[in-house]
Image: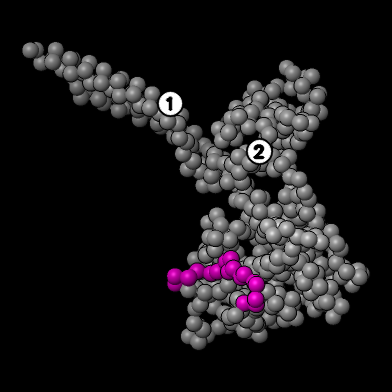
Amino acid sequence: MDKRLSSFINTVISVFIALIVWVLVLLISNNNEHPFDITKNGRYTLALQSKQAVTSLTTPVKVYAFNDEKSAAKSEELLKRYSSIDPQKFTYEVVDPIKKPLLAKKYGIRMRGEGVVEVKEGKGRTERLTGISEDELTAALLKLQRNATYKAYFVTGHGERDLSQTEPTGYSQLRADLVKEGFVVEPLSLAATPKIPADANLVVLAGPIRPLLPGEQKLVKEYLDNYGRLLMMYEAETPDSYTELVKPYGIETTGNIVLDQFSQKLGAEPVFSIGLNFDPSHPITKDYKIQTMFILARALKVAATPPSGVIDTVLITTNTVPPTALEVPLADVLGQTSLKLDLTKIKPSVATLAIAAEKKEETPKASPTPAPDQVKNTRQVRVVTVADSDALSNQLYVVNKDFALNSFNWLVANDTAISIRPKDELAQPLNMSGQEQTKLAFLLVILLPVLVVGLGLFNVMRRQ
């Protein structure tokens, strides 16, 4: 057979085989679609909380996204991810408000980019969306399913963190997210009240630096004795008397400050403690896989013999292998302008940064003649102690957000809201100077085309 004919036949066969393989790949991929998200912050993957918000729907919902044709694609891409979890419970429609003005008017839509989540059964409740984003969509779905609100009182008057302050040390971001989670957040002056309000689902001591008055201490103790819930957050200056509130639940402090050698790997000062180990069995930290951060944290510990009926759980610790925490006395840190430590005298250890305590007591239902199989009411005391109140401040809140909100929801027994939430999108713009833009334009518009043409001419001349 002629050499040219043989080469031609081999080429045709190769092309034919390649086409068959290509068609098979298309068929297989079409029937087995599985997207991979390789973005740094998982931008194209729904958070665990978003998935749970769809799977936990008891009635179907429909989302109307009001966008023009140019911006519709991005909204539809996000809504499709929600719908893929359960197409029966979650449906959507992208609408141009100009083309369907009556529908836009029905839901009070005034501008493009807004949306509505509507429950399709019952009274047809709706939730407005100011934007079509995962954070807003998930919050709206959870709000439609919420049957209760929770009252969280933040104690004031002892140097605690300010809920309204937008500075790095303030708690404005935490407060805004608690409202989204169904909490009513209010300050509480213990000196101005005869007792803690009956509607309190939770009392928060956010880094007090002055002691409670004896009467105030008694109010908090009585509240806990009556199956209360407490979030206690320390500062380096927090008086030791606050430990008396949590000691009956097996939680103690060592009187030391935690410095962490591991923080230097992150380019931070050793005053930052990095929480890297989490209890996988506790609801607060069950799915936690990212680090937490604290500043000048007070070292915590669980009592050697926990009180009767109390279950203590160490939620967060510093690095374990190898140990990197350096516990130093308060006096060596407070009032010092710089850290002067003799590392030869300090043995690295594993420091505890957060502890949860739970005490259950069972009492029979009020009944003159209770039946043998009568169900018992279970009331619980729940306490979470955090080694540093900076962990929930605006400065570190973005790092510790899930831990913070999970702690609040666990304390009020709103366990269904405990999850890993949508992360903020990380914008990574390419900032270039005018000179750099000129160089890039020269490379793409002139140099690269000339190089391609030159290689082509060289190849033709070589063959001839």
Q: Which mark is residue 55?
A: none
How far, Cα to Cα, is label 1 from label 2? 29 Å
Residue 202 visible in the displayed image: yes
Residue 173 visible in the displayed image: no
In the rendered image, residue 458, in percent from the top left (x then y), is placed at: 26, 26
Query: What residue span does the magenta drawing correspond to?
Result: 306-322
In the visual, does 368 lie left or right of 28? right
Relative depth, front residue between 267 and 440: 267
Say if 41 sits above or below 263 in the image: above
| Mark 1 residue crowding within 10 angstroms, few (<14) / some (14–19) / many (20+) | few
Instruction: Say what secondary structure mark 2 lies in.
Output: loop
Q: Residue furthest left?
A: 1
Please tell me in which quadrant of the rendered image residue 150 appears.
bottom right
In the rendered image, residue 223, in percent from the top left (x then y), is placed at: 80, 69
In the visual, does 106 lie left or right of 386? right
Please tell me in which quadrant of the rendered image residue 311 appears.
bottom right
Quadrant that contains the C terminus: top left
Q: Which mark is residue 57?
A: 2
In the visual, does 175 lie left or right of 265? right
Residue drawn at (78%, 61%) of the image: 369
Q: Is residue 242 magenta?
A: no
